[in-house]
Image (cartoon, rainbow, N blue to C red):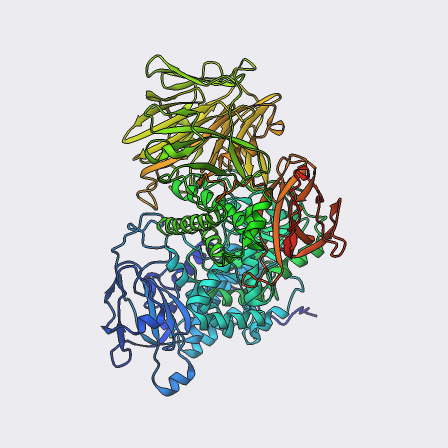
């Protein structure tokens, strides 16, 4: 009996060729189904049902704003509009066109969405006409267009090329269209299938199944009518699952419970980069309005947004849009993140500036949206200081996101999710997305990379997919959201791709990691800075901007200290009786002075804005100029009231005789300064008389001394035992400058000797010389951003020449030299002075007329000192980096960021370079270098061309760095005395011996950095409580204990330890030797005991009594 094992009909004979394909050719075929050479006959040909552009359908009227102006909506609508048509050109730069960026408004001024013209991946030119307008038959809107591409207007198309300020754009389309929605969805289906094919390995079932489906769709394409498209979409369901699209956002509720990849939409907008701030204001409105529109169509869409400054601009210029954003924040769809004023540079801002980034950012977000941020967010910063973990946690945030280290050009950063531990030991849970971008396109490749590129799957296997067009803005587009829905549909039916989810927050993503890692216990740890091995030239490019940042940070510190004077009400006569009480704390009854909180806030916001990762330098220069002007006016106002009749000594001295020289010290450190004063003409009336005059007799030198914690410096003399300084030369090629401590020799234009006279120790390495040096500076691409390691291979040592003695001693000696190179002239004055019991150093004051291209100017010293690390100041501490190249991690740090000093030390001795405006340093072996000027030509063709003035100093010191006072010396070097001339009449203007009302006793490694008013004070109210905020930090990296002392004439009600946002952590108890019997307020010597760990930052709040003056108390000098 025959055996039949099946019902099939497998033929006995076969004359065919079979279905074997040549896979790579089939895969290549997929790229021909959309656009390209076959766009007239492939799927692209049926994407639109109708397209109309005649004047009877589209009536265009246009007005071009003059020059580079950016009128607000109401102003623009008042202008005269003229007829326009497709093909018209608009310009010059920053004006009109889809082909460029634009924004659609309602006639009432509500921004609806952004437009991004041209044909890149960020193209967004469609606007959906509301159904009610279709039924009405007319639709009116206003389009504001900027004549710039997403990345400005580079003249030759290269992103970083200098701008073409006369570039015009053409209006390519202004059409009324009816899209074929089914065809568009088929296009998205096909794109997802193609991405799967291109992403997954060729031997995976899903890759082959997707290729079969995509090929079948191409074979099924015929007429492109609705039935044909329905048939092709049915083929795609073989991969996505039957009926997947009808589920909409609910597709994410099916399938795996835990997603490995969490999607969050984001729109990185450089607050300025290749465009000015005014364009960023437009980019913000365009991008965010578009995201609000997408939320209505895609309920799962969550948009994360940082940078309080951009929100403030939006609030000021687009209030209806800002109100809509507030609603979306409240509904949980629009997420505020970052907690900072801007996404700032993570290297060069001072510690206090980083604090203010969070203070101003968090306070703004809380005031406008009802809550603060929990996640710090710096995806694009060019490296991150190790001070950050402490500052992030103390600003109320637990999590941190970044990714720029994926740009490293030497080493691959080893972690994706990790605990980042800062210099003080504080940790923050951190994620560096393995997708390696904050502008992901939400492709299958992006999702897959979230796992395949993850560095520590063993401890946590989740990744944040941060998607949306960025840098120039834009954010997510429908294609991305559609693609993610399809990827999730695939997840629900196959296991070849990691599951992706939508609809959660960044905080939920981190909270899941926190739980899954047992509160971080199973995560790897990274200690120290996150050094970016890229963009090292940014520490030096645009010298004037770096100088503006440093000087304005210090000016604001000084302003806040001196404007504390209005905390207390008192009488002038009482004030004059209490000579030991700081004048700045007291408000005179005759004065209607109000603490200038608004002006100080405005200045800080400008400085913080300029600390964004990129900037347009004309804008930055203008803001720094405004800050300098406002701060100097505030200082003059404060000092003028406190020191009645005084005038600044920086200008012309007073004419009426006689006048005393008064100098104000804004640091807490003891110091001796030799100041230069005019002595000819009206300057003859200044007292006391100078200890030395210049060679030309027009100026004199005066020696001033400030004791520790004193505010006012006073004239002093040098003891006869302390030897004079001298300078000798045998011509222009050999100079010897000598003090009682140090000797500097310049021979044949180079520094050949730096000699410690007391220890009889030579500090320049034998056979070597130091001085200025030029290196060829031609980075591989990012001209203004990068300095590459190969620049060190082409040095040209420069020689000082034309030496001229301009001060011969005995208290101050100075020689003026000149260096000529190419088209540039560098005048350097090197002074030294005799200052007993002061820090010995040689200062270099440079005036440069710079006209080089692709060169970098440095100062270097080859030292007879050996150590494997050099020490550089960073925010609230220091960081050590290798002087060798043992590994590629070491070799990559050939140019590093430092603040006010760099130091190379060994046991028993060291040498530091101090800087008042530079940030780029290096130490190669025993050669310590400071970068001074660069000369890139893109994107600014004239970068740093012209005149510059800056100073640096060389400071040898006995003992290693940790045994030295280099941090204090650098602090003083960056804080010049404020010089004033005060009337000498003792009855009308009694002398003031002003000491700080707050000072430290105990460990010398703890610094009092900031004294300011409390953020929550009511400055207009005389009866409201008043607070003083003190910020202290440990500067050397070890434990310390100090007494924070308060002058007995300041009545403090209570004291609190707070976080950086000035929220109370705990009440502090006073230690005192006396108190007022009725109030319990301390009236005699009292203090707070404070313990510090290495590099710890503490913030103390003092609540001041309303009547804070102890009128019957006499100054108790013993309290010092």
Q: Residue furthest bottom?
A: 136
- Is any part of residue 23 visible from this angle? yes
Name the residue rendered at 37%, 68% in the picture: 103
Which is nearer the eye, 277 or 1054? 1054
Horizontal and vertical percent for residue 577?
59, 45
Relative vertical location of residue 731 with respect to residue 880 in this rendering, above or below:
above
Q: Residue furthest front?
A: 987
How many numbered marks appear?
0
What quarter of the picture does the C terminus occupy?
top right
Q: Residue 1106's quadrant in the figure?
A: bottom right
Name the residue rendered at 47%, 72% in the picture: 293
Relative vertical location of residue 866 with respect to residue 278 in this rendering, above or below:
above
- Is any part of residue 203 visible from this angle? no
Which is nearer the eye, 1088 or 78? 1088
Horizontal and vertical percent for residue 161?
32, 47
Horizontal and vertical percent for residue 347?
51, 43
Which is nearer the eye, 242 or 948? 948
Name the residue rendered at 63%, 35% in the picture: 1036
Horizontal and vertical percent for residue 428?
64, 49
Which is nearer the eye, 329 or 703? 703
Q: Is residue 853 left or right of residue 379?
A: left
What quarter of the picture does the N terminus occupy?
bottom right
Q: Residue 50's quadrant in the figure?
A: bottom left
């Amino acid at each position: 009996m025959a055996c039949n094992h099946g019902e099939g009909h497998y033929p006995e004979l076969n004359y065919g060729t079979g279905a074997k394909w040549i896979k790579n050719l089939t895969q290549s075929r997929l790229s021909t189904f959309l656009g390209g050479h076959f766009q007239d006959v492939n799927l692209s040909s049926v994407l639109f049902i109708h397209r109309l552009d005649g004047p009877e359908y589209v009536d265009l009227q246009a007005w071009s704003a003059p020059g580079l102006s950016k009128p607000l909506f109401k102003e623009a609508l008042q202008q005269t509009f003229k007829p326009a048509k497709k093909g018209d050109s608009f310009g010059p730069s920053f004006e009109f066109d889809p082909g460029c960026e634009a924004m659609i408004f309602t006639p009432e001024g509500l921004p609806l969405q952004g437009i991004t013209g041209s044909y890149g991946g960020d193209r967004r030119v469609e606007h959906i006409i509301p159904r009610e307008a279709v039924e009405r038959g007319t639709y009116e809107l206003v389009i504001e267009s900027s004549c710039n591409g997403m990345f400005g207007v580079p003249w030759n198309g290269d992103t970083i090329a200098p701008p073409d300020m006369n570039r015009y754009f053409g209006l390519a389309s202004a059409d009324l269209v009816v899209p074929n929605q089914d065809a568009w969805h088929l296009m998205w289906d096909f794109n997802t299938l193609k991405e799967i094919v291109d992403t997954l390995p060729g031997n995976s079932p899903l890759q082959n199944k997707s290729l079969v489906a995509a090929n079948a769709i191409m074979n099924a394409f015929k007429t492109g009518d609705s039935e044909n498209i329905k048939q092709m979409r049915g083929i795609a369901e073989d991969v996505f699952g039957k009926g997947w699209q009808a589920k909409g956002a609910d597709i994410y509720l099916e399938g795996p419970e835990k997603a490995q990849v969490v999607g969050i939409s984001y729109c990185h907008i450089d607050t300025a980069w290749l465009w000015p701030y005014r364009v960023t204001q437009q980019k913000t409105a365009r991008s965010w309005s578009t995201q609000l529109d997408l939320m209505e169509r895609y309920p799962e869409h969550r948009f994360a947004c940082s940078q309080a400054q951009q929100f403030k601009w939006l609030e000021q210029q687009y209030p209806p849009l800002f109100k809509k954003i507030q609603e979306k924040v409240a509904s949980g769809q629009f997420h505020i993140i970052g907690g900072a004023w801007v996404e700032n540079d993570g290297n060069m801002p001072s510690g206090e500036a980083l604090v203010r980034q969070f203070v101003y950012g968090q306070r703004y977000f809380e005031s406008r949206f009802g809550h603060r941020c929990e996640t710090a967010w710096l995806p694009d910063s060019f490296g991150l200081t190790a001070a950050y973990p402490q500052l992030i946690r103390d600003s109320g945030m637990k999590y941190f996101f970044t990714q720029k280290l994926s740009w490293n050009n030497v080493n691959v950063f080893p972690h994706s999710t990790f605990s980042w531990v800062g210099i003080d030991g504080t940790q923050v849970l951190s994620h560096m997305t393995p997708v390696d971008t904050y502008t992901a396109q939400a492709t299958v490749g992006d999702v897959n990379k979230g796992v395949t590129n993850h560095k520590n799957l063993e401890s946590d296997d989740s990744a944040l997919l941060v998607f949306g067009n960025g840098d120039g803005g834009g954010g997510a587009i429908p294609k991305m959201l559609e693609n993610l829905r399809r990827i999730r549909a695939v997840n629900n039916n196959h296991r070849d791709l990691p599951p992706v989810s939508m609809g959660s927050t960044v905080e939920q993503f981190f909270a899941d990691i926190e739980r899954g890692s047992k509160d971080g216990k199973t995560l790897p740890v990274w200690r120290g800075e996150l050094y970016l091995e890229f963009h090292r030239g940014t520490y030096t490019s645009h010298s004037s901007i770096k100088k503006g940042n440093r000087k304005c940070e210090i000016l604001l510190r000084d302003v806040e200290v001196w404007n504390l004077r209005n905390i207390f009400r008192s009488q002038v006569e009482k004030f004059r009786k209490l000579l030991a009480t700081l004048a700045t704390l007291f408000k005179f009854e005759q004065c209607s002075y109000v603490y200038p909180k608004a002006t100080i806030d405005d200045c800080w916001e400008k400085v913080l804005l300029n600390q964004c990762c990129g900037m347009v330098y004309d804008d930055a220069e203008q803001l720094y100029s405004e800050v300098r002007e406002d701060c100097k006016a505030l200082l003059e106002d404060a000092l003028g009231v406190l020191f009645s009749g005084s005038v600044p000594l920086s200008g012309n001295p007073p004419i009426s005789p006689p006048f005393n020289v008064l100098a104000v010290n804004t640091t807490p450190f003891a110091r001796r300064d030799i100041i230069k004063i005019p002595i000819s003409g009206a300057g003859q009336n200044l007292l006391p008389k100078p200890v030395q005059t210049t060679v030309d007799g027009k100026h004199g030198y005066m020696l001033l001394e400030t004791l520790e914690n004193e505010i006012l410096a006073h004239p002093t003399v040098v003891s006869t035992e302390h030897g004079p300084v001298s300078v000798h030369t045998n011509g222009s090629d050999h100079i010897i400058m000598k003090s009682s401590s140090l000797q500097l020799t310049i021979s044949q234009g180079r520094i050949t000797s730096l000699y410690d006279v007391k220890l009889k120790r030579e500090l320049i390495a034998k056979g070597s010389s130091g001085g200025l040096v030029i290196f060829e500076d031609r980075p591989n691409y990012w001209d203004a951003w990068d300095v590459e390691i190969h620049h060190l291979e082409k040095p040209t040592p420069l020689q000082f020449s034309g030496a001229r003695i301009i001060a011969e001693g005995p208290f101050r000696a100075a020689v003026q030299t000149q260096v000529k190179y190419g088209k540039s002239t560098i005048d350097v004055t090197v002074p030294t002075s005799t200052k007993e019991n002061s820090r010995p150093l040689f200062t270099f004051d440079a005036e440069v007329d710079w006209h080089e291209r692709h060169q970098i100017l440095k100062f270097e010293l080859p030292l007879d000192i050996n150590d494997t690390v050099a020490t550089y100041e960073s925010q609230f501490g220091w960081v050590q980096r290798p002087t060798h190249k043992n590994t590629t991690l070491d070799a990559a740090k050939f140019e590093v960021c430092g603040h006010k000093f760099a130091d190379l030390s060994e046991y028993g001795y060291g040498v530091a370079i101090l800087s008042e405006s530079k940030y780029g340093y290096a130490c190669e072996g025993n050669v310590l270098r400071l970068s001074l000027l660069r000369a890139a030509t893109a994107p600014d063709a004239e970068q740093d061309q012209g005149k510059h003035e800056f100073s640096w100093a060389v400071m040898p010191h006995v003992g290693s760095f940790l045994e030295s006072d280099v941090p204090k010396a650098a602090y003083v070097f960056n804080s010049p005395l404020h010089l004033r001339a005060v009337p000498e009449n003792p009855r009308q203007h009694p002398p003031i011996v002003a000491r700080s009302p707050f000072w430290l006793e105990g460990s010398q490694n703890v610094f009092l950095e900031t004294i300011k008013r409390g953020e929550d004070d009511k400055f207009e109210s005389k009866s409201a409580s008043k607070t003083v905020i003190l910020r202290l930090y440990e500067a050397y990296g070890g434990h310390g204990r100090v007494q924070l002392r308060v002058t007995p004439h300041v009545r403090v009600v209570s004291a609190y330890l707070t976080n950086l946002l000035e929220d109370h952590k705990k009440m502090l108890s006073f230690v005192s030797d006396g108190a007022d019997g009725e109030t319990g307020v301390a009236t005699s010597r009292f203090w707070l005991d404070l313990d510090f760990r290495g590099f710890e930052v503490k913030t103390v709040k003092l609540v001041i009594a309303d009547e804070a003056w102890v009128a019957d108390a006499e100054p108790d000098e013993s309290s010092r």
